[in-house]
Image (spheres, rainbow, N blue to C red):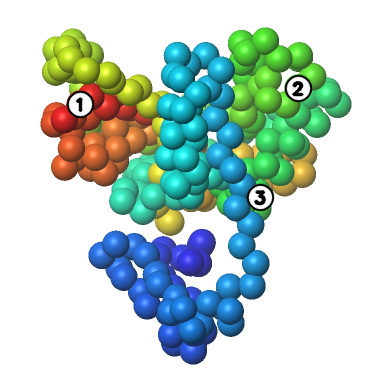
Amino acid sequence: MLADFEYPCIYGIDFIGGAKIILDFDRKSLAIPDSQIDKVVKTVEVDKVEIDRSKTKLEEKQKRELQGLFDSFQGLFSDKPGLSHVFYHMIDTGNNPPIISRLYRYDREKQEILDYHVDKMMKEGTIIHIQSPYVSPVVLCRKNKGLPPDSPEAYRFTVEYRKLNAITKYHRYPLPLIDDLIMNIPQRGIMSALELRSGWIQMAVNSIDIVKTAFVTKNGIYVFRKMPFGLSGAAPNFQKAIQKILKPIIGKFVNVYMNDVIISPP
């Protein structure tokens, strides 16, 4: 898949045809004939899914069965955030000129933490290094996780988008009422509560609006390919996207509020 195209597309049709790979677009999967596996697949490394089960009340047999279930779906436990094209976040600034803000100054320790997050997002494909007429500064927010103050993970990387948000048209979308969600949860059986990891950062930004997400560091200007935290309309747009994805099962055995999902017995 090519990352920076306006529309998702497949590159390498000659290889796909030569390897006799079968593409199933309905299931979003591909199949490699047995006769071609040795030619196409050279090495496959599979990491065991590590789940902390120390605080569970399961018996050892149940823990092994649970671990086996996790391992059978290990492809869903990737450490890297994905990118959904089910919805594109738009930044409608009308006819307003680009906004420009000065670079915030950080001491050496904070600069190293900032560089850590930038490098991490570059490797994950979350941001790219380009020029942009828009510039917003970076703010490091301390997280209360008991981590030492010199730990990069003790800080949340955020961008000061207040100037951009001031000229952005806010597209509303109703958020679910908490009371209604609680009333819809069946009072029976065992329920599972899931919190989506890096949920917002897995929504794509509209290609023509990517330049508006630009932020500046001493090493240059970067933009987000994926929807960052802090943009005007990001919260309702994420709710709209997650409801579109889970629409067939919402209200049946799934209830969702932003990145929190509650699964009850069907």
Apparent side of residue 174 relative to residue 257 in the rendered image (left or right): left
- Say whether residue 11 is visible: yes
Point 27% across, 27% down: residue: 263
Are the residues tagged 1 and 3 within 8 Å (C-beta)? Answer: no
Q: Which mark is residue 151?
A: 2
Crowding at mark 1 (Cα within 10 Å: few <14, some 14-19, many 20+): some
Mark found first going from the N terminus, 1 or 3: 3
Type of amino acid at the residue the image marks with label 3: Lys
Mark found first going from the N terminus, 2 or 1: 2
Tell me residue 10's x, y (percent). 43, 73
Q: Looking at this view, is 158 or 209 the one in front?
A: 158
Q: Of discs 1 and 3, which sits in the foreground?
A: 1
Tell me residue 98's x, y (percent). 50, 44
Point 33% across, 23% down: residue: 192
Crowding at mark 2 (Cα within 10 Å: few <14, some 14-19, many 20+): few
Please give the residue where the numbered disc 3 appears in the rendered image.
123
Please give the residue where the numbered disc 1 appears in the rendered image.
265
Type of amino acid at the residue the image marks with label 2: Ser
Say which element carries label 2: loop
Say which element carries label 3: helix
